Image (spheres, rainbow, N blue to C red):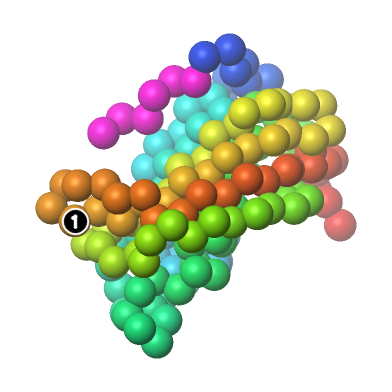
Amino acid sequence: MPTPVPQGLVPKTTDFADRIRANFKTQSAMTTFGIEMLDVVAGHTRLEMLANDRVLQQQGFVHGGVIAAAMDSACGYAALSLAAADREVLTIEYKVSFIAPAVGERYEFEGQVIKPGRTISFTEGTAFAINGGVRKLVATLNASMAIVAAPYS
C-alpha cells in the first residue's frame, strides 16, 4: 500500500527523498535488524522488516527494543524529510505503548510528523505485524526530534 501524502507539510529541499534513502543506508542498526526503507514522502516514512529469528525475545515475539528502534528511525527520518539539507535530527525523547505481541510474516513501521518546527519536530510512530495481508497494530510511539546542524558532534 503506498504511503499517503501528508497535507500541509512542505520539504525545504527538492531532493529530500534521495537524501533520506542515502542516509538510511548508513544506519548499521537498521541493517542488523533487517529493516529497509519502503517509502519517503514529505513528513512521512515507512520501513519494513521481514520476520527473522535475530530480533526475537524469549517468548518468540519481536523484541520491544527492536520495535521501538524502528519506530524511532521512521519518526526521525520523517522529521529529517522536512529539514534543510544542512540539518540532521536527534531524538530528544519518546514514549512507546506496546498494544499487542508482535508476531507476523513481516512488519511495517511508520513515522509521521504531526508538528514540524525550526528546532524541534513532534512525531508519531506506528508498528504493524502483517499476516496474510492483514495489518495488526502492535505499538505506537510519540517522539520529539531536535533539528541540529550537520554534522552533529
Note whether 84 is above or below 128 in the view shown: above
Range covered by the magenta-colored residues: 1-6
Q: What is the residue that sits farthest to the bottom in this orientation?
A: 58
Locate residue 94 relative to residue 24 in the image: left or right: right
Q: Main secondary structure of the magenta part?
A: loop
Q: Is residue 135 magenta?
A: no
Can you give x and y, in whole percent of width and height, for residue 38 in the image?
A: 37, 43
Q: What is the residue that sits farthest to the left in this orientation?
A: 132
The kind of residue tagged 1 is Asn
Can you give x and y, in whole percent of width and height, for residue 2 in the image?
A: 31, 30
Locate residue 1 relative to residue 97 in the image: left or right: left
Q: Quadrant of the C terminus?
A: bottom right
**Residue identified by numbered label 1:** 131
Q: Residue at x 35, y 64 (%)?
A: 102
Whether residue 17 is visible: no
Q: Residue at x 55, y 60 (%)?
A: 68
**Mark 1 Cα-neighbour bin, 10 Å: few <14, some 14–19, many ≥20:** few
Q: Quadrant of the N terminus?
A: top left
Can you give x and y, in whole percent of width and height, for residue 61 in the image?
A: 35, 74
Q: Name the secondary structure under disc 1.
A: strand
Name the residue nearer the viewer: 86 or 5: 5
Q: What is the residue that sits farthest to the front in this orientation?
A: 99
Locate residue 81 relative to residue 84 in the image: left or right: left
Name the residue nearer the viewer: 30 or 68: 68
Q: Is residue 3 magenta?
A: yes
Whether residue 134 is visible: yes
